[in-house]
Image (cartoon, rainbow, N blue to C red):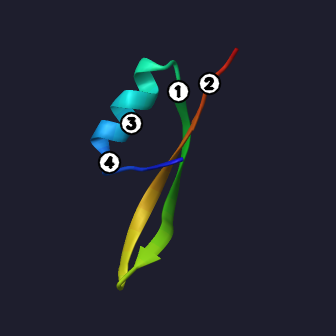
Amino acid sequence: MVVTSNQKAKQFYSTLGFQTYGVEKQAFKYKGQYWDEELMAIYI
């Protein structure tokens, strides 16, 4: 799971073979701001 705005983390996981299988909108709330979560898995 990665916050959708965290490009470095998403790129890192992609280089390891992880793929996005969904997005959970407004999964986290911090100081009044919501963050979407990108769901990633590696298929072996």
Tell me the quadrant of the picture where the C terminus can be found.
Answer: top right
x and y, in percent, of residue 28 in the image: 49, 69
Q: Earlier in the sequence, mark 2 or mark 1?
A: 1
Question: Which residue is found at the position 45% from the left and 76% from the top?
Answer: 29
* Residue density around tag 2, few if under 14, some if 14–19, many if 20 or more, within 10 Å: few
- Left or right: 34 in relation to 37: left
Mark 2 lies on residue: 42
x and y, in percent, of residue 36 in the image: 43, 59
Badge number at residue 10: 3
Badge number at residue 34: none
Q: Earlier in the sequence, mark 3 or mark 2?
A: 3
Mark 1 lies on residue: 19
Q: Earlier in the sequence, mark 4 or mark 1?
A: 4
Residues under labels 3 and 4: Cα distance? 6 Å
Secondary structure of the residue carrying tag 4 is loop
Reply above or below: 38 against 31. above
x and y, in percent, of residue 24 in the image: 54, 56
Mark 4 lies on residue: 6
Report the residue that reaches farthest toward the bottom.
32
The amino acid on which the numbered mark 3 sits, given as a three-letter code, is Lys
Secondary structure of the residue carrying tag 2 is loop
* Residue density around tag 4, few if under 14, some if 14–19, many if 20 or more, within 10 Å: few
Q: Are marks 2 and 1 in contact (CB under 8 Å)?
A: yes
The amino acid on which the numbered mark 1 sits, given as a three-letter code, is Gln
Residues under labels 2 and 4: Cα distance? 18 Å
Reply above or below: 20 against 33. above
Reply above or below: 38 against 32. above
Question: Which residue is found at the position 37% from the left and 39% from the top?
Answer: 9
Report the residue that reaches farthest toward the right.
44
The amino acid on which the numbered mark 4 sits, given as a three-letter code, is Asn
